[in-house]
């Protein structure tokens, strides 16, 4: 049975991980990954966390949800606290109207240089994101990677990207951030030699007409066959240094009068055409 702890004071210090989540300063800390923990909200996302290898600090539930999570919590230590509050009190903890019934706090992992080397050695494809600050796009990239390419695809992020453990990015990813290997690199320039040494061909995606059409790459796959997809931010795209350093510049053909498509959409198309589920 879960370690349920009934709480009646919304400012109980044991709930401090969940305090004032709607406060702008708190949200900025979450967005930039400056807290040693992250917050998940909603039944599907919390179950994904519980089924993952990530440490769980605690759960915050309304009374009806605590029992519903008994089986999922059996995967965890019996000491994992489950704080139970009536729904009307939870808003006093979080600062917003609480209607999903459950929150969880997870411990942020530290990724070392050895972890990065392991991720690259075990991946058949890598998505390298440069300064992707939109949490919808970033969360969707993780969901795309899991759904369209499956196991063996990793994500690398440069500084300036939204933290993948930002609460809203986790929600958009539908919890796939817990299933998709990922790590931060200091820059694209620093990552490219590591990718090449691990046997990856780097593809920089751009709307420039001078780039090679995606279908040409599909018909004439590069060698080595392990691919790294480079995507730039929502406004300026990839930096000139990243663009020039890539092995191949690739464009997705678009209708006349349009000049770009959403980063997450571009990633989905690229994965579907070049790295589909079940491919070697």
Image (cartoon, rainbow, N blue to C red):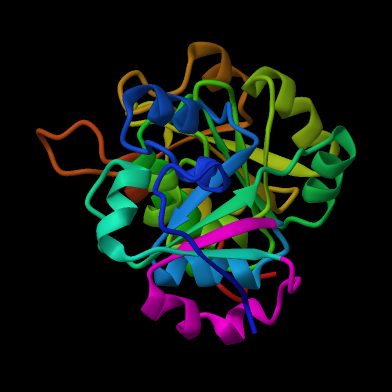
Q: Residue furthest right?
A: 114
Image location (x, y in percent) of residue 126? 64, 47
Q: Is residue 230 above or below residue 237?
A: below
User: In the rendered image, which quarter is residue 36 located in?
Assistant: top right
Q: Is residue 26 above or below residue 56?
A: above
Image location (x, y in percent) of residue 271? 49, 57
Front residue of 140/224: it is: 140
Image location (x, y in percent) of residue 155? 61, 45
The residue at 39%/30% (across/down) is 27
Q: Is residue 49 above or below residue 15?
A: below
User: Would residue 266 be seen by someone viewing this image from the given angle?
Assistant: no
- Quadrant location of the N terminus in the rendered image: bottom right
Q: Residue furthest left?
A: 257
User: In the rendered image, which quarter is residue 63 located in?
Assistant: bottom left
Q: Is residue 261 magenta?
A: no
The residue at 37%/54% (across/down) is 172
User: Would residue 110 be seen by someone viewing this image from the given angle?
Assistant: yes
Q: Which residues are magenta?
A: 56-79
- Quadrant location of the C terminus in the rendered image: bottom right
Image location (x, y in percent) of residue 12? 49, 45
The residue at 30%/55% (across/down) is 89
Q: Is residue 250 above or below residue 130?
A: below
């Amino acid at each position: 049975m879960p370690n349920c702890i009934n709480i009646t004071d919304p400012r109980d210090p044991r709930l401090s991980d969940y305090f004032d989540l709607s406060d702008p300063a708190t949200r900025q800390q979450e967005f930039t990954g400056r807290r040693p923990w992250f917050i998940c909200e909603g039944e599907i996302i919390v179950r994904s966390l519980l089924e993952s290898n990530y440490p769980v600090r605690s759960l915050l539930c309304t009374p009806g949800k605590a029992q519903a999570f008994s089986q999922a919590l059996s995967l965890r230590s019996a000491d994992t606290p489950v704080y139970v509050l009536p729904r009307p009190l939870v808003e006093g903890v979080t600062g917003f109207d609480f209607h999903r019934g459950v929150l969880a706090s997870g411990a942020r992992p530290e990724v070392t240089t050895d972890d990065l080397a392991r991720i690259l050695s075990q991946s058949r494809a890598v998505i390298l994101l440069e300064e992707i600050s939109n949490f919808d796009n970033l969360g969707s990239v993780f969901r795309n990677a899991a759904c369209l390419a499956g196991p063996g695809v990793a994500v690398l992020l440069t500084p300036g990207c939204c933290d993948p453990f930002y609460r809203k990015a986790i929600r958009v990813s539908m919890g796939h951030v817990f299933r998709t290997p990922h790590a931060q690199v200091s820059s694209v320039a620093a990552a490219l030699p590591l990718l090449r040494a691990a046997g990856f061909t780097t593809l920089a995606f751009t709307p420039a007409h001078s780039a090679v059409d995606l279908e040409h790459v599909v018909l004439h796959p590069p060698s080595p066959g392990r691919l790294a997809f480079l995507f730039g931010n929502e406004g300026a795209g990839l930096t000139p240094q990243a663009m020039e350093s890539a092995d191949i510049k690739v464009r997705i053909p678009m209708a006349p009068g349009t000049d770009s498509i959403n980063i997450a959409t571009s990633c989905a198309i690229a994965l579907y055409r070049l790295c589909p589920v079940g491919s070697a």
